[in-house]
Image (cartoon, rainbow, N blue to C red):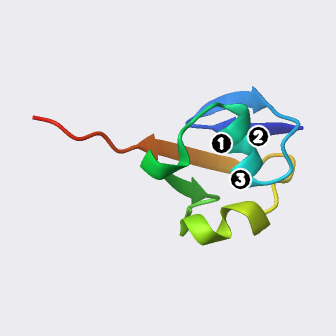
Amino acid sequence: MKIRLNGADCETASGNIGALLEELALPKQTALVEHNGQPLHRTDWDRTQLHEGDKVEVLRVAAGG
């Protein structure tokens, strides 16, 4: 299915946000996710289903100066 990921078109076979992060090889501990304009708590990632045309923003938190 096609989704919009960080402002770019993306093809994915993932059915939910948790699977998408795994597909992208992003460490879940450092990710913040917004789905269709709504911030998601990480406990909701595996139960938040993806649908054609969804908009997902993923940010990675990094420590340092």
Q: Residue at x 63, y 48 (%)?
A: 56
Q: Residue at x 74, y 62 (%)?
A: 46
Disc 3 from disc 2: Cα separation: 11 Å
- Amino acid beneath label 3: Ile
- Amino acid beneath label 1: Leu
Q: Considering only order in the chain, which callout, 2 or 1, is on the residue closer to the N terminus?
A: 2
Q: Choose between 23 and 59: the one closer to the eye.
A: 23
Q: Choose between 50 and 62: the one closer to the eye.
A: 62
Which residue has dot 2 on it?
3
Q: Residue at x 69, y 39 (%)?
A: 22
Q: Choose between 64 and 13: the one closer to the eye.
A: 64
Mark 2, other Cα within 10 Å: few <14 / some 14–19 / many ≥20: some
Q: Position of residue 29 (x, y in %)?
A: 47, 51
Quadrant in which the C terminus is drawn: top left
Circle number at residue 17: 3
Residue 54 appears in the figure: no
Q: Position of residue 7 (x, y in %)?
A: 57, 35
Which image quadrant is residue 1 in?
Answer: top right
Circle number at residue 21: 1
Circle number at residue 5: none
- Whether residue 38 sits left or right of residue 20 in the image: it is left
Mark 1, other Cα within 10 Å: few <14 / some 14–19 / many ≥20: some
Q: Position of residue 14 (x, y in %)?
A: 84, 43
Cβ–Cβ below 8 Å for labels 3 and 1?
A: yes
Residue 55 appears in the figure: yes
Disc 3 from disc 1: Cα separation: 6 Å
Q: Considering only order in the chain, which callout, 2 or 3, is on the residue closer to the N terminus?
A: 2
